[in-house]
């Protein structure tokens, strides 16, 4: 991975495949998200304070598969379903928990995760 910067000065970590993640995203998280993106696994994301593990308890716009934006800086997007066109950028540096939509299996959880 290499660090790049966009025209407004934001820093990203760019993978070999071209996906760009917020520079504050841990490399282990990037690797996990790339696996989920390639497999098309439908997930539920819990965003929160990555330093403390406190969940922000968001309920809307938190479930879907990972897609990619277009353009020079290709960031991961949360795509609601197969019929959806586009979605919002995933706050990769704020993920405190990821669960599989089917079965509720925990894929990732911050060591100090709490609501």
Image (tube, grey):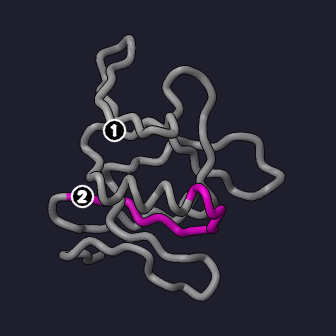
Q: Under tag 2, what secondary structure? A: loop
Q: Is-magenta flag for residue 44?
A: yes
* Residue occupying the point 63% across, 68% down: 42
On the image, numbered disc 1 is attached to which residue? 1
Which part of the image, by quadrant, shows the C terminus? bottom left
Q: In the current view of this chain or complex, which residue is farthest to the right?
A: 83
For the record, the magenta segment spans 37-50
Q: Residue 17: which numbered mark, if any?
A: none
Residue drawn at x 57%, y 56% as measured from the top left: 37
In this view, the residue in front, 85 or 3, is: 3
Q: Residue furthest top?
A: 7
- Image position, residue 95 (x, y; %): 36, 59
Task: Identify the disc placed on residue 49.
Answer: 2
Taking the image as shown, residue 49 lies to the left or right of residue 16, namely left
Of the residues tagged 2 and 1, which is closer to the observer?
1
Image position of 106 with respect to 90: above or below: below
Residue 68 vs 6, above or below: the answer is below
Asked whether, in this view, residue 29 is left or right of residue 106, the answer is left
Secondary structure category for the residue under label 1 = loop
């Amino acid at each position: 991975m290499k660090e790049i910067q966009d025209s407004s000065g934001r820093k990203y970590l760019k993978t070999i495949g071209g996906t760009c993640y917020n520079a504050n995203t841990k490399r282990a998280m990037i690797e996990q998200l790339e696996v989920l993106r390639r497999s098309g696994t439908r997930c539920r994301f819990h965003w929160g304070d990555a330093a403390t593990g406190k969940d922000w308890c968001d309920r809307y716009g938190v479930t879907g598969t990972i897609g990619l934006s277009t353009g020079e800086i290709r960031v991961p997007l949360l795509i609601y379903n197969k019929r959806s066109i586009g979605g919002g950028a995933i706050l990769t540096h704020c993920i405190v928990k990821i669960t599989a939509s089917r079965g509720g299996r925990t894929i990732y959880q911050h060591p100090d995760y709490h609501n």
